[in-house]
Image (cartoon, grey):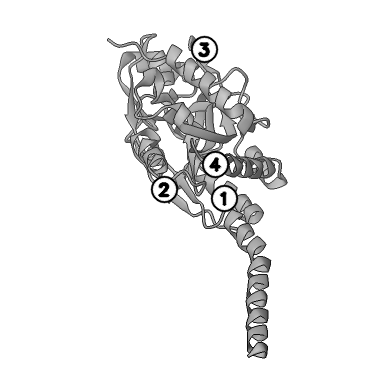
């Protein structure tokens, strides 16, 4: 009987000891982040700049964090259909989203269904000047000729969506007498096809996003909205020389839902820092003809986006 009790006690102690030994491992397992794949929402169709960023960045994040980042393309409403997906998810650190200047523009004047305060920025990853691009064999030799035609009759311009910088840049010329008609396309492929197929006369884009069309001589830039010449296309005229000084660069940031655990936010922001400093990402920026100093870390990204929103609000199209 005594041996039975002794053996039972030993077994109890062994079980308890095993439990104590496992406890730190269980705690570590529970604290591991990310603990499962992280949804990477892209509020635009496949093939465009936002999609290209997500796929390039996702590969770097997977290597660093040891989990997959499946891409979810959810286009519509100038990026807000995809944003709704992010904002309806749990703030558990397992959903991130590309947030761009055009989507920011839809929040101007408090008109959006959400506010910047509902987002937790992880970093601004890329910034590029926008420009107008035409089919390579278009009749206009320069922007002066195109603008003269736009003052005589309507020209269609493919844009990402209403309410953002794309529309604002175009409308600024309309305020000077041009007759540009913005036509929104949520999917980049449709936007590019519109000008190549003759359904639109012009498309507003970033040089890096349409680089394959530029390199294959299917498109060419005709003007850029920038303070300085576009790298690689220094001979192309700037809009400010034609009376439009507005130059809101396209930016693409990565955001999470506000309210996500601070440690998870810090971990993901650190991963963005690491990715942005990598040779692979710097090459990506160069290939995209983006600003070399594009990256803005999480600590400063919120202030940057607030400044951009104020700039957009100050240049909202005048209501007729």
Callout 4 touching callout 1 (CB < 8 Å): no
Q: Is residue 23 left or right of residue 180?
A: right
Which circle's residue, 4 or 1, is located before the other in the chain?
A: 1
Density class for disc 4 (Cα within 10 Å; few <14, some 14-19, many ≥20) is few
Which circle's residue, 2 or 3, is located before the other in the chain?
A: 2
Q: Based on the displayed image, in which of its 4 quarters is residue 202 positioned?
A: top left
Disc 4 marks which residue?
261
Looking at the picture, does residue 152 appear above or below residue 46?
above
Density class for disc 2 (Cα within 10 Å; few <14, some 14-19, many ≥20) is some
Question: Residue 11 appears at what percent x and percent y?
Answer: 64, 81
Which circle's residue, 3 or 1, is located before the other in the chain?
A: 1
Q: Residue at x 57, y 53 (%)?
A: 34
Q: Helix or strand or loop: what does disc 3 sit on? A: loop
Disc 2 marks which residue?
73
The residue closer to the viewer here, 26 or 142, is 26
Q: Residue at x 60, y 54 (%)?
A: 31
* Residues at marks 4 and 1, CA–CA distance in whole angstroms: 21 Å
Disc 1 marks which residue?
58
Density class for disc 3 (Cα within 10 Å; few <14, some 14-19, many ≥20) is some
Question: Residue 223 appears at what percent x and percent y?
Answer: 51, 23
Disc 3 marks which residue?
245
């Amino acid at each position: 009987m005594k041996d039975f009790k002794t053996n039972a006690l030993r077994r109890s102690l062994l079980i308890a000891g095993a439990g104590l030994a496992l406890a730190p491992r269980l705690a570590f397992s529970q604290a591991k982040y990310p603990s499962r794949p992280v949804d990477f929402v892209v509020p635009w169709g496949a093939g465009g700049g936002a999609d290209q960023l997500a796929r390039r960045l996702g590969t770097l994040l997977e290597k660093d964090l040891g989990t997959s980042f499946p891409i979810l393309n959810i286009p519509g409403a100038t990026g807000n259909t995809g944003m709704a997906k992010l904002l309806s998810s749990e703030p558990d650190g397992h959903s991130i989203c590309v947030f761009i200047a055009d989507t920011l523009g839809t929040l101007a004047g408090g008109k959006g269904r959400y506010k910047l305060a509902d987002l937790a920025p992880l970093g601004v990853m890329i910034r590029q000047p926008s420009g107008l691009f035409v089919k390579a064999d278009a009749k206009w030799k320069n922007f002066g000729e195109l603008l003269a035609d736009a003052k005589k009759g309507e020209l269609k311009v493919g844009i990402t969506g209403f309410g953002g910088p794309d529309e604002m840049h175009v409308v600024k010329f309309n305020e000077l007498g041009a007759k540009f008609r913005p036509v929104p396309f949520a999917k980049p492929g449709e936007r590019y096809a519109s000008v190549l197929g003759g359904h639109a006369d012009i498309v507003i884009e970033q040089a890096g996003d349409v680089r394959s069309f530029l390199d294959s001589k299917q498109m060419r830039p005709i003007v850029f909205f920038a303070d300085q010449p576009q790298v690689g296309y220094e001979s192309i005229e700037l809009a400010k020389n034609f009376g439009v000084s507005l130059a809101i660069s396209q930016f693409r940031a990565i955001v999470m839902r506000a309210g996500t655990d601070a440690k998870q936010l810090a971990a993901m922001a650190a991963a963005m820092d690491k990715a942005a400093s990598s040779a692979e990402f710097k090459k990506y920026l160069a290939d995209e003809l983006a600003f070399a100093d594009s990256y803005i870390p999480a600590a400063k990204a919120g202030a940057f986006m607030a400044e951009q929103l104020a700039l957009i609000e100050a240049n909202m199209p005048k209501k007729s």
